[in-house]
Image (spheres, rainbow, N blue to C red):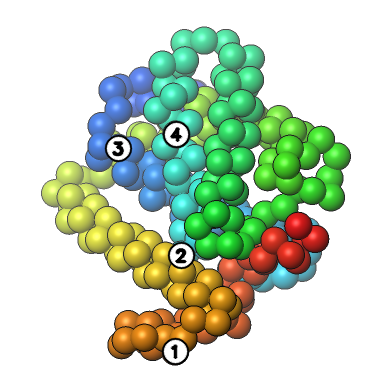
């Protein structure tokens, strides 16, 4: 069993060392977004006793922050695979903290809402990121590059290419449509709360399909800045 596990990990690491391709990056994004959503759902269930949505999209169980973060980690840290664990750790801490900060600022600017808030915690940087959590980003980067990323690369490489191409096209189309729909729904929510009435069939449909209570249930961590006293 030990030899089998060691051999599997060696194959996985060999797969991870191969040059990055758009096909591989897409599936790293999709699988990480799916796994990240699942991790957060389980975390909330265990720590808070709540079974709640943690998806970034109105359709599908995908966390875009996890997916984009995984791709960002992979692209930037891939050249560091031969470096020490400490190099990967501190690189991941800096990269993850910066990515989380940027995502928080962009979401608040684009939609006028806050998806996570650290202002009540010590070592918070403008409430967008917590320096202690940056250490968890560093640990996540280390585990990702040394274990999870290699295993996912091996899984991707073992998938029959003919079937994978059709599945890739279908999933890419679904994610693109869901992302556009999510952006439109959140923008329309922002306009509703600003007192702007619906004008046209699309706005009316968005108001009916994605009212504020539905969106709040779908994104339970989403609140206006005033909710946190900002």
Q: Earlier in the sequence, mark 1 or mark 3?
A: 3
Task: Find numbered disc 3 in the image and state the secondary structure of the residue it sits on.
Answer: helix
The residue pinned by badge 3 equals 24
Please tell me the numbered disc located at residue 72.
Answer: 4
Tell me residue 78's x, y (percent).
42, 22
Q: Residues within 10 Å of mark 3 (few under 14, many from 20)?
A: some
The residue pinned by badge 2 equals 57
Task: Find numbered disc 1 in the image and state the secondary structure of the residue it sits on.
Answer: helix
Q: Earlier in the sequence, mark 4 or mark 3?
A: 3
Q: Earlier in the sequence, mark 2 or mark 3?
A: 3
Tell me residue 7's x, y (percent).
43, 23
Is residue 35 visible in the rendered image? The answer is no
**Mark in front: 2 vs 1:** 1
Q: Residue drawn at (73%, 42%), measured in percent from left and top?
A: 126
Q: Residue drawn at (59%, 33%), measured in percent from left and top?
A: 98
Please tell me the numbered disc located at residue 208.
Answer: 1
> Is 7 drawn above or below residue 120 in the view shown?
above
Residue nearest the viewer, comparing 155 with 220: 220
Horizontal arrangement in the rendering, residue 190 relative to residue 200 (left or right): right
Q: Residues within 10 Å of mark 2 (few under 14, many from 20)?
A: many
Query: Disc 1 vs disc 4: Cβ atoms closer than 8 Å?
Result: no
Is residue 183 visible in the rendered image? The answer is yes
Residue nearest the viewer, comparing 160 with 133: 133
**Mark in front: 4 vs 3:** 4
Q: CA distance from mark 2 to mark 1?
A: 17 Å
């Amino acid at each position: 069993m030990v030899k089998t596990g060691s051999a599997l990990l060696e194959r996985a690491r060999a797969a991870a060392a191969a040059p990055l391709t758009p096909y591989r990056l897409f599936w790293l994004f999709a699988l990480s977004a799916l796994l990240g959503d699942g991790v957060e759902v389980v975390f909330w269930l265990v720590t808070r006793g709540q079974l709640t949505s943690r998806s970034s999209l109105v359709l599908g169980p995908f966390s875009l922050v996890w997916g984009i973060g995984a791709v960002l980690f992979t692209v930037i840290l891939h050249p560091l695979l031969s470096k020490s664990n400490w190099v990967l750790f501190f690189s991941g801490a800096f990269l993850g903290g910066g990515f989380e900060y940027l995502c928080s600022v962009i979401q608040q600017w684009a939609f006028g809402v806050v998806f996570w808030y650290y202002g009540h915690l010590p070592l918070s940087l403008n409430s967008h990121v917590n320096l202690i959590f940056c250490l968890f980003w560093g640990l996540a980067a280390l585990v990702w590059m040394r274990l999870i990323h290699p295993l996912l690369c091996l899984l991707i490489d073992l998938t029959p290419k003919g079937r994978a191409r059709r599945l890739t096209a279908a999933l890419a189309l679904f994610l693109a449509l869901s992302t556009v729909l999510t952006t439109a729904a959140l923008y329309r929510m922002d306009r509703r709360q600003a007192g702007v009435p619906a004008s046209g069939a699309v706005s009316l449909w968005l108001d009916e399909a994605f009212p504020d209570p539905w969106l709040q249930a779908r994104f339970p961590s989403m609140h206006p800045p005033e909710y946190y006293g900002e």
